[in-house]
Structures are given as C-alpha cells and as structure tokens.
Image: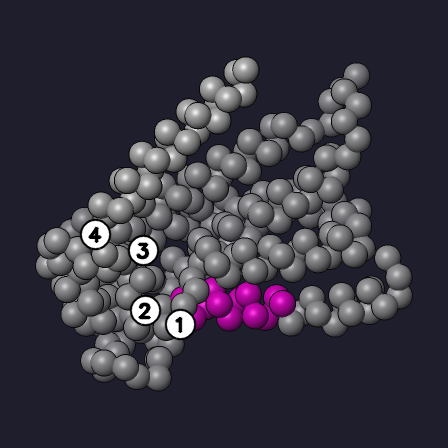
Amino acid sequence: MSRFFYVGALLVVFGFLVAAASLLRPFGIPTVSEMDDHFIQNAQTETGANNAVTAVVFDYRGFDTLGEATVLTTAVIGVMLILRKVQK
Amino acid sequence: MSVVVRTIARILFPMVLAFGLYIIMHGHLTPGGGFQGGAVVASAIALIVVVFGGERLIRQKGVLSVLEDIGGAAFVALALVGIGATFFRNVLAGGGGLFGVSPPFGPNPGILNTGGTLPPMNLAVGLKVLTGLGSVVLLLYLYGGNDDR
C-alpha cells in the first residue's frame, strides 16, 4: 500500500523536474557575456598560457583551486581515519 | 599474478608514469593540468599495487605523506609570491625571465617557457594529487580487507 504512495511521489517530483528542465536557456548562450568575452580575448596576453581553461582555473579563479586542494586533503584524512589497524 | 601479467606490468609502468608527467607538465598548452595528470600517475601506482601487492610499497608510506605536504605548501607559497598586488597574482607572465615569454596571439605550436606561475602551480597540485590518491590506494590494500572488528 505504501509502495504506491512512494511511486506516486516519485512521479510527481519527476514531473516537476521535467517542467523545470524545459524552461532552461539553450546551452552556451548566456544572458550577459562580457566576462566570457574578456576571458577569451585576453587570457593569452595576460597570463601567457595557450589553454584558457587552465588560465581560468589557476589564475583568474585560483582561490577556488585552493579550496579544491583542501577538499582532496580532507578526503585523504578521512580515509586514513577509517581504515587503520585497530589495537585489540 | 601470473607471469604474463607481471611482465606486461613491468613494461607498462614507466610508460604510464611518463604519460602522466607529460600531462602535468604541459597543462598550460594542451588539455590537462595538475589534477588530471596526478590521477593518471595514481593509476600507475594502483597498477603496481594490484599486480605485485602492497608489501613492496609499505616502506614508502612516510615518504608519500611528506611529499603531499610539500606539494600543498608549495602551492600556497606560489600563491603568496605576488602578495604585493593581490593573492594569486601572476607575476611571472610576460616578464622575460623563467616562464615569462609571451606567446604570439592566436593559435600557435605551444612554447613551454610561457605561462608565468601556471606551470609550477601545475607541478605542485600534480604532486599533491599523485601522493594523495596513491596513499588512498595503498591504505585500501593494506587495511581494507576482512571487516572483523
């Protein structure tokens, strides 16, 4: 009996997701694009790198890369905490 | 593991190592960079752990931990080089010194000497990801066995 309730709830949520996804903008056409044009035009002369993605990740938005390295460190610490030889 | 697997692993390990280091070093010219190249080299370490067992690498646990700390500290130190202007300031780009050559505008065959502080940052992050994921793989082999606690 409760199984039908859960299936019905899943269908309602899925219907809302499909309705929201049909309202999105087409992929790759933002509303304002001045920052993207600045990155594409000036990434090679300002940072000196051919790869615009690496220039954005390490130079324009370098602080987020620092947070990502911290997340990796936290993951390694978590694995070291859980998997260890328990002293009996 | 059988003789065929061990022989092929001995041949493949330096090739995967060289490929991963190539992806790390050329992060500012081709797709790739620090995180991607570090994952490739960690898969080479996983190959050694699967084929030969983790007992050969158990002495290197302290070395891996120290190298991860060096990678993280080098990343923050490189970010603090240009602290006169801002945090993460690219002070070496276009300067003419080490990694300071300006590339020609438009598509070009990449010059390795460009990029400013980007290639050293790629090396630091690559070292950190390499040793971190290698430590996780080694720990999963050593202590992730039977759950008899």
Labels 4 and 2: the sequence-earlier one = 4
Q: CA distance from mark 2 to mark 3?
A: 10 Å
Circle 3: is it few (<14), some (14-19), or many (20+) Cα within 10 Å? some
Residue B122: quadrant of the picture: bottom left
**Three-letter code for the amino acid on which mark 2 is drawn:** Asn
Numbered disc 2: secondary structure:
loop
Q: Does the image show residue B95?
A: no
The dot on residue A51 is 2
Instruction: Residue under label 3, please give it.
Output: A57
Q: Which residues are magenta?
A: B16-27
* Percent of width and height locating residue B34: 44, 58
Instruction: Residue under label 1, please give it.
Output: B30
Q: Is residue B40 above or below residue A74?
A: below
**In the depicted view, which residue is nearer to us: B90 or A58?**
A58
Residue found 59% across the figure and 70% down from its top = B18
Residue A83: quadrant of the picture: top right
Q: CA distance from mark 3 to mark 1?
A: 14 Å
Q: CA distance from mark 4 to mark 2?
A: 27 Å
Residue found 75% across the figure and 39% down from its top = B142
